[in-house]
C-alpha cells in the first residue's frame, strides 16, 4: 500500500521542511581550485548525504533556495542555538562592586546575576546615563580606566527547586557593605526597602 506524497512546491513549504531536518544539517565549505582559503558564503548543503543543491533528492528535484537564503537560515539557526545556550547556562549569584579607584567611591550590591548587572552599569556609564550621579561624575572626570567592575563573592547553588536566594543574598550583601564601609543603595540593593535615600 502506497501513501500519497505531496512534494513541497513553495519556498514557505521548503522552509518548513528545512526546519524539520535542520538538526542533521552539515555545511561543507568548498575550497577554490589550487587555493587554501575557502570562498566566503559559497556553501553546498547536505542533509544526511541525501540532498544537495541543484541535484535530485528524496525531498524533490532540487533545493529551491539560493545560497543567500540558505546562509541566512543557517545563521538564524546558529543564533537561536547561542540564545538557548545562554538561557540554559548556570547563573552565578552573588555580590558585585563598581568602584572608581581615583575617588574610592563604590557601589556594592547583591544580584541573582551579578555579571549581567556589571555589564548594565558599564553600559550606563558609557552612555552617560547612570542613575547614581556622583559615580557618573567620577566617570566623566577620571574616565573608564579609573573604574573596576568585579564580582566580590558568590552564593553556592542549591539543588532545591523551590529555593529562594533573596534572604541569603541579603545577608551576603550586608556582610560586604559592612566590610567595605559602603552605604547601601536602595536603587540597586537586592532588598531595597531596608534603605532610605537621603
Image (cartoon, rainbow, N blue to C red):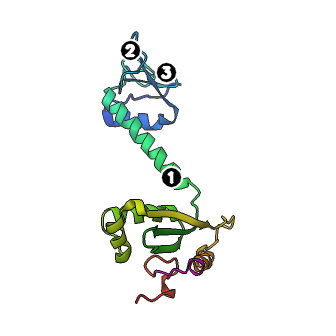
Residue underneath mark 1 = 86
Q: Residue 119 location, x and y as percent? A: 44, 61
First in sequence: mark 2 vs mark 1: 2
Q: Position of residue 77 (x, y in %)?
A: 43, 40
Residue identified by numbered label 3? 50
Q: Position of residue 111 (x, y in %)?
A: 53, 70
In terms of secondary structure, where does tag 1 sit? helix
Residue 65 seen in render: no
Task: Give the extent of the magenta segment.
Answer: 177-185
On the image, numbered disc 2 is attached to which residue?
32
Q: Is residue 118 above or below residue 103?
A: above
| Residue 181 visible in the shown view | yes
- Residue 67 vs residue 185: left or right? left
Q: Is residue 131 above or below residue 115?
A: below
Extreme residue toward the right, this view: 159
The span from disc 3 to disc 2 (Cα, nearest Å) is 24 Å
Amino acid at each position: 500500500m502506497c501513501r500519497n506524497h505531496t512534494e513541497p512546491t513553495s519556498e514557505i513549504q521548503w522552509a518548513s521542511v528545512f526546519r524539520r531536518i535542520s538538526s542533521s544539517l552539515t555545511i561543507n565549505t568548498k575550497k577554490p581550485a589550487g587555493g587554501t582559503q575557502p570562498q566566503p558564503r559559497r556553501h553546498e548543503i547536505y542533509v544526511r548525504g541525501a540532498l544537495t543543491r541543484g541535484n535530485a533528492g528524496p525531498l524533490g528535484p532540487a533545493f529551491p533556495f539560493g545560497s543567500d537564503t540558505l546562509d541566512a537560515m543557517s545563521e538564524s539557526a546558529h543564533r537561536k542555538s547561542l540564545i538557548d545556550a545562554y538561557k540554559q547556562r548556570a547563573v552565578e549569584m552573588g555580590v558585585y562592586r563598581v568602584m572608581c579607584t581615583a575617588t574610592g567611591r563604590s557601589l556594592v550590591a547583591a544580584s541573582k546575576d551579578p555579571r549581567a548587572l556589571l555589564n548594565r552599569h558599564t553600559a550606563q556609564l558609557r552612555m552617560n546615563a547612570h542613575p547614581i550621579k556622583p559615580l557618573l561624575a567620577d566617570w566623566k572626570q577620571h574616565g573608564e580606566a579609573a573604574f573596576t567592575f568585579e564580582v566580590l563573592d558568590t552564593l553556592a547553588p542549591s539543588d532545591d527547586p523551590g529555593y529562594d536566594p533573596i534572604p541569603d543574598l541579603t545577608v551576603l550583601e550586608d556582610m560586604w557593605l559592612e566590610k567595605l564601609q559602603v552605604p547601601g543603595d536602595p536603587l540597586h540593593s537586592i532588598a531595597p526597602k531596608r534603605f532610605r535615600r537621603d
